[in-house]
Image (cartoon, rainbow, N blue to C red):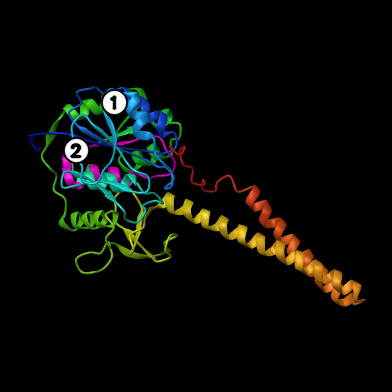
Amino acid sequence: MTAPDSRRRDLVVVGGSAGGVEALKAFVAALPRDLPAAVLVALHVPPTSRSMLADILDRAGPLPVVAAKDGMPLEPGQVIVAHPDAHLLVVDGTVALGPGARENGHRPSHDAMMRSAALARGPQVVGVVLTGLLDDGAAGLVCIERYGGACIVQDPDDADFPSMPRHALAAVPSARSVPLAELAGEVVRAVSEPVSGSPEVPEDVRIRDEVELTSALGQTPTMPDGAPAGQPSAYACPDCHGVLNTIPEEGVLRFRCRTGHAWTADSLVARQSDSLEEALWTALRVLEERIDISNRLADLALENDRPWSEGHFRGRADEATRSAEAIRAMLQHPPDEGPLAPVHDLAL
């Protein structure tokens, strides 16, 4: 058994998505004024939105809440909120705003934030996953556990959107699962606990984690031998169409492409569903145009007393109409078991 050392947990990283504003307000309101840890918060919002989350949370509780700035120090008792369209990262004990590729379709990404915190502070980190859709945060929580940090998840039965908490618990079964009303108290308890010595992390795993952090910082994520992390898969990246490599990660099926886009399995399936829907709408538009052109040609043939040509073009119009009706039915009534389309919180 590893003996405790003199360090305390002094960094809390919190990720939320759909339903996250109200959850964060309740969480921040319950934190004590003398919390001896810095708190980083990332929420999925559209990249072009102007975030008011820092102002909202600043009014919600006793701790000062500020928007993240590149290079700012981590101060105990302060809450730092991510910017839209920038990864919120910890590098050398300070905040870094990463312009790197999106992870799970998001920037800021919970996985990227948690991975950077784990690399920077190891067992001094507390990772928290709140309500939200899909599975961002699950791989990040695995990384926090790998480096000895504490993992806390909102009880899925208590969450407005239970998908993120459920995936986090599936990836890290040892994580503490508590309802929102008890979450701040559980964080205070984790912060007050003595830290055990840092666990041994295999060198190749640590190097891979560091390479993935460089991706969030905007650099090319290649291993020391120049190859991308992981092994090539049969899948293409939905964002850049490059080959996705499978990243070996216990508890989470993950992929990353050469340019840095990263995906967990559920997020990849959801993005592929978006691409399929876009393709179906394009096909529907082409068919509608074909129907119109075919009918115009049929009318022209009728005016010129060319019955064979009229029948030919009417037949093409009828065939296109049947195909268009089938595609429209698919778009209006998707299968119940199909993946959810991405849903963002309000643009704050």
Q: Position of residue 130 (x, y in %)?
A: 36, 34
Which of 188/24 is in front?
A: 24
Which of 309/246 is in front?
A: 309
State the image quarter where residue 67 is shown. top left
Is 313 situated left or right of 67 in this image? Answer: right
Q: Quadrant of the C terminus?
A: top left
Is 11 situated left or right of 163 in this image? Answer: left
Q: Position of residue 176 (x, y in %)?
A: 29, 32
Q: Is residue 133 magenta?
A: yes
Cα gap from disc 2 to disc 1, whole angstroms: 19 Å
State the image quarter where residue 165 is shown. top left
Query: Crowding at label 2, few (<14), some or many (≥20) Cα neighbours within 10 Å?
Result: some
Residue shown at the point (29%, 25%) measured from the top left = 184
Tag of residue 74: 2
Residue shown at the point (12%, 43%) measured from the top left = 198
Q: Is residue 332 magenta?
A: no
Q: At numbered mark 1, what does the secondary structure look like: helix, strand or loop?
A: helix
State whether residue 327 is above or below residue 84: below
Residue shown at the point (68%, 52%) measured from the top left = 329
State whether residue 314 is above or below residue 331: below
State whether residue 219 is above or below residue 308: above
Tell me, yes or no, if residue 154 can be seen here. Answer: no
Q: Position of residue 299 (x, y in %)?
A: 86, 69
State yes or no: discs 2 and 1 in contact (Cβ < 8 Å).
no
Span highlighted in magenta in the image: 119-144
Residue shown at the point (68%, 54%) measured from the top left = 328
Residue at numbered disc 1: 184
User: Which of the two discs, 2 and 1, sits closer to the camera?
Assistant: 2
Q: Residue type at mark 2?
A: Leu
Label 2 or label 1, whichever comes before in sequence order: 2
Q: At numbered mark 2, what does the secondary structure look like: helix, strand or loop?
A: loop
Q: Residue type at mark 1?
A: Ala
